[in-house]
Amino acid sequence: MAKDAPLAFRISGELKKKLLKIAKRERRSLSQVCDILLNIGVREYDRSGTAYLHKTFDVEEDENPPNT
């Protein structure tokens, strides 16, 4: 599949550090790692539908409870 559509967005510095660590460990570029992980996520979303994202959001909320 041709890679002909650029995509740019902001992420946290912490997430970028984690992605760079994965890229180094896997001996791949940051771009390749992001492409692979995005493809995995889209494939899983296609399989599970909105339940996939809802499950992910629920985990994030458990890890980051609201300040009280």
Image: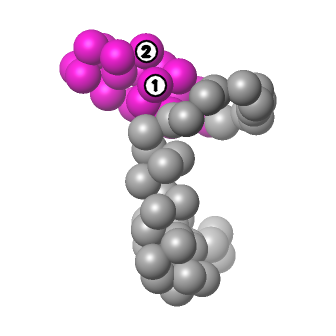
Drawn side of residue 20 relative to residue 58, left or right: left
The local secondary structure at tag 2 comes to loop
Q: Please name the residue shown 27% across and 14% down the image.
A: 27
> Is residue 62 or residue 56 the one in the foreground?
56
Task: State the quadrant of the N terminus.
Answer: top right
Where residue 17 sits in the image (x, y, percent)?
Answer: 45, 24
Classify residue 28 as left or right of residue 8: left
- Which one is in front, 32 or 11? 32
Magenta-highlighted residues: 12-34
Q: Is residue 68 visible?
A: yes
The residue tagged 2 is 29
Please name the residue that numbered disc 1 is placed on.
32
Tell me which residue sits at (43%, 15%) in the image.
29
**Location of the C terminus (image quadrant):** bottom right
Does 36 sit left or right of 10 as displayed?
left
**Of the residues shown, which amino acid type is indicated by label 1?**
Gln
Residue 49 in the image: state x and y as whole percent.
56, 82
* Magenta: main secondary structure: helix
Q: Relative to residue 17, is residue 62 depicted above or below?
A: below
| The furthest residue to the front | 1
Which x, y percent locates residue 44?
A: 44, 68
